[in-house]
Image (cartoon, rainbow, N blue to C red):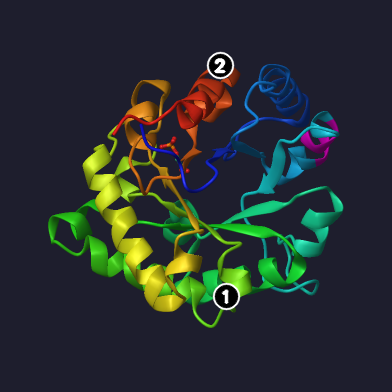
Amino acid sequence: MTQRVRRPIIAGNWKMYTTPPEGRTLARAIRTQAGELSQVDLVLCPPFTSLSAVAECLQHSTIGLGAQNMHWEMEGTCTGEVSAKMLLTVGCQYVILGHSERRTSFGETDEMVHRKVRTALASGLIPIVCVGETLAQREAGQTDQVVCMQVREALSDLSAVDLVRVVLAYEPVWAIGTGRVATPDQANAVHRRIRALLVELSDEEAAGRIRIQYGGSVKPENAAALLAEPDIDGALVGGASLKADAFLEIARAAVSPRVS
Ligand code: PGA
């Protein structure tokens, strides 16, 4: 058996699901059963309108709260946007940035993700930075190149202190919401590549502390095998995070001892 070097982090990306009452019900169900999970960081990321309701349910618990996006400015004439200050005020500690659905459907660029990462860190939010290749890029043998470019751009010019606070999420676009999951070997190979890049961007010690989640069709049935990989430090869970039982089963898979 091998010990985990990094504390696992399991985050639920609720996407555009749950009204505030539905969010409350789901958060309560997760909180009630999460008691035994003291060795894993759990984070719930509801839509903006459910953040306050979920924050209330998570009071005095160790479960973290995250948003799914934010603007890089603190305030301004930005219709339809939400700032870091606003997220902090409703109780967020985390924010998902650069999710592929934001990049693909809303035109988010690496440069925008980079600005958001800097603002999040400067404000005291922990960014969960998503990167990942499309199916065409994987089939063209460009996975490492695409993912490394996204990581490099998102994390450029960060101090060592800031860098270790970042959580990365490797989410192959072809695996998100498709039921098609990367094999543990495929996922771990990319995580290893990202970690090697992190050594370049900082040093061995810092790179060894940064957590890299896997995301893309993580389910209770495949979580244990993925999370047993040495460079997979958690999961960013979409569909399966909308069911308390499934989400908690994935979280439990992160704390079971690894067999080497
Ligand atoms: P999925 O979504 O688990 O439904 O594939 C993951 C994500 O988009 O973060």
Q: Secondary structure at mark 2?
A: helix
Total count of labels: 2
State whether residue 193 is above or below residue 177. below
The location of residue 53, given as percent across then percent down, is: 82, 34
State whether residue 161 is above or below residue 40. below
Q: Nearer the viewer, residue 5 or 202?
A: 5
The stretch in magenta equals 52-56
Can you name the residue that lies furthest to the left here?
A: 140
The location of residue 95, given as percent across then percent down, is: 64, 54
Instruction: Kindly identify the amino acid type of the residue bearing the numbered disc 2.
Output: Asp
State whether residue 223 is above or below residue 155. above
Asked whether, in this view, residue 71 is left or right of residue 221, the answer is right
Label 2, label 1: how far apart the Cα atoms are: 37 Å
Residue placed under numbered mark 2 in the picture:
245
Q: Secondary structure at mark 1?
A: helix
Picture disc at residue 126: none
Residue drawn at (68%, 72%) of the image = 119
Residue drawn at (82%, 58%) of the image = 86
Residue 17 lies in quadrant: top right
The location of residue 16, given as percent across then percent down, is: 59, 39
Asked whether, in this view, residue 199 is left or right of residue 59, the answer is left
Q: Residues within 10 Å of mark 1 (few under 14, many from 20)?
A: few
